[in-house]
Image: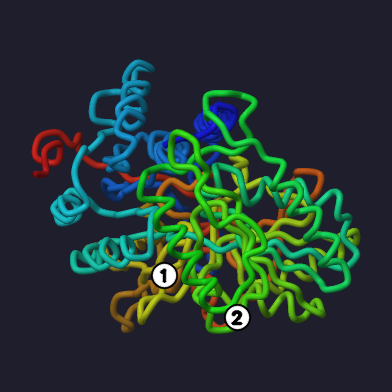
Amino acid sequence: MGKRINEARGEVRCCADILAYYAKHADAFLVPTKLHPKVGEAHTECSPLGVPFCVEPWNFPYYQLARVAGPQLMAGNRLVVKHAGCVPQCAIAFERLLLDAGAPVGAYTNLLISYEQSDRVIDDPRIKGVALTGSVSAGHSVAARAGQNLKKSTMELGGSDAFIVLDDADIDQAIPWAVCGRMYNSGQTCCAAKRCIVLEKIAEPFLAKFKAALEALKPGDPMEETATHGPLSTKAAPVQLLAQVDAAVKGGPMLLMGGQRIDLPGWFMQATILTDIQPGNPAIRDEFFGPVVSFYRVKTEAEAIALANDSDFGLGGSVWTRDEARGKRVASRLDTGMMFVNNLDWADADLAMQGTEARFGHIDVLVNNAGIGYFAAVEESEEDEVCKMFDINVFGTGRMLRAVLPGRPGTGRPRAQCQGHRPGGGVGSAAAPPAAGQRYLGRCDGQAYPLTRGLRGGRRCRAGGGLPEAQSRRFGLTATNLQGPLRSAA
């Protein structure tokens, strides 16, 4: 898909980190947890629920597989994966790598099928959960099919991250991050810095330096280490991007730079900056999946926050300031799952890849594998004093609470109630999610800390009454070795 060689090597290292992370922490993640109810004794156990079907994109052809395979294999589970049609070699190589490492046949199964054939896989009773990373339209289709089958689904449907530069920011520090945040992977990243929001006081000097830095990028063969601007993934990619830019410019924005192809073998497009974008322009709501930056000047910090929150996406973002306390305060006011202060480090294996809710039509989806909440299932045993509660995590883990309750004469069977949305990552996110009401903020020292914050108006996952421990870990799905019909779902 045209990834530059230096970035490709970094992606492979990231995959190794993810797999090593789950191998190292498996015992701690899977150990039963003792609870302390007011009546009786209780503990949580990690138990398999079923087989996940994962539909993965092309932009990080190994990372997208590693982040779903890691947690599933950690728990001894199996999964089936449909990778993007333009990177079948990567899909085959990843499965072969696992087999060569000693994984049993069927632990990880590639399905070389079309999107239309995916419906048959979702319909298969052996599939218990569905995860998709892709476009909004693909999310509509897959989530609807999963819903028809009453199967859990998690959707990561893109992003339009805000890169907020406050008036006290160190411009020389922020510029390299702005270039990397927008141009990494040729701009084909869900959590790229697509919207640059700068306070008016420093907007002009920032824009001048940003434009110069983008103009200094060197397009070239992605296999050459000296190239700093790579091609797009397919022939269709620049066609779509250029059409989006043209539609935006017709609505009034100024094309400060770019907006054209680059005359090189492959599908190259110039780094592009759009400025003076007015309300109602399609650039306000669209995601530009390539080297296009939307630049906004705002007068106040409050305007920057309001503009950043005026988006259908809530995947990630960053704040740039010399005052770390101010940066934390601004970050906490954004309706965004991953916020960074003076840093952008999306892929640390220790951090959750998690976003907040986005709205498309009448369907509420939680972007970036934040998941769609389900009421917990409650199943009574034959004995009145024993109640088994299954807390169903949104990405497919069955966490079984065995609660031993004393019989209560005259009251009938004791019924355990546990319901509410379950926060956490999607099928195979890269690390344990923050606890309910928490998000991760990256600090400028590269570390992370949880930002505790109340949940407002349904805009974030909600932890209902129930199992407080069940929201802080992620595990996989298991079931039978999927051979036969699912291999050739045609």
How many neighbours does mark 2 have within 10 angstroms: few (below 14), some (14-19), or many (20 or more)? few
Q: Secondary structure at mark 2?
A: loop
User: Residue placed at 54% from the left, 32% from the top?
Assistant: 4
Of the residues shown, which amino acid type is indicated by label 1? Answer: Val
Measured as percent of width and height from the top left, residue 22 is found at 51, 35
Residue 385 numbered tag: none
Placement of 21 over or under 434, stated as above or below:
above
Measured as percent of width and height from the top left, residue 61 is found at 42, 37
**Where does label 2 land, which residue?**
456
In the figure, is residue 59 to the left or right of 449? left
Placement of 143 over or under 76, stated as above or below:
below
Nearer the camera: disc 1 or disc 2: 1
User: Residue placed at 75% from the left, 45% from the top?
Assistant: 447
Q: Is residue 463 visible?
A: no
Pick whichever of labels 1 and 2 is earlier in the sequence.
Answer: 1
The quarter of the displayed image where residue 279 is located? bottom right
The quarter of the displayed image where residue 208 is located? bottom right
Looking at the image, how many numbered discs can be counted on the residues? 2
Q: How is the image coloured?
A: rainbow
Q: Nearer the viewer, residue 333 or 149?
A: 333
In the figure, is residue 378 to the left or right of 67? left
Q: In the image as oriented, which residue stretches furthest toward the front?
A: 263
Measured as percent of width and height from the top left, residue 478 is found at 29, 42
- The quarter of the picture where the C terminus appears is top left
**Where does label 1 land, which residue?**
365
Of the residues shown, which amino acid type is indicated by label 2? Answer: Arg
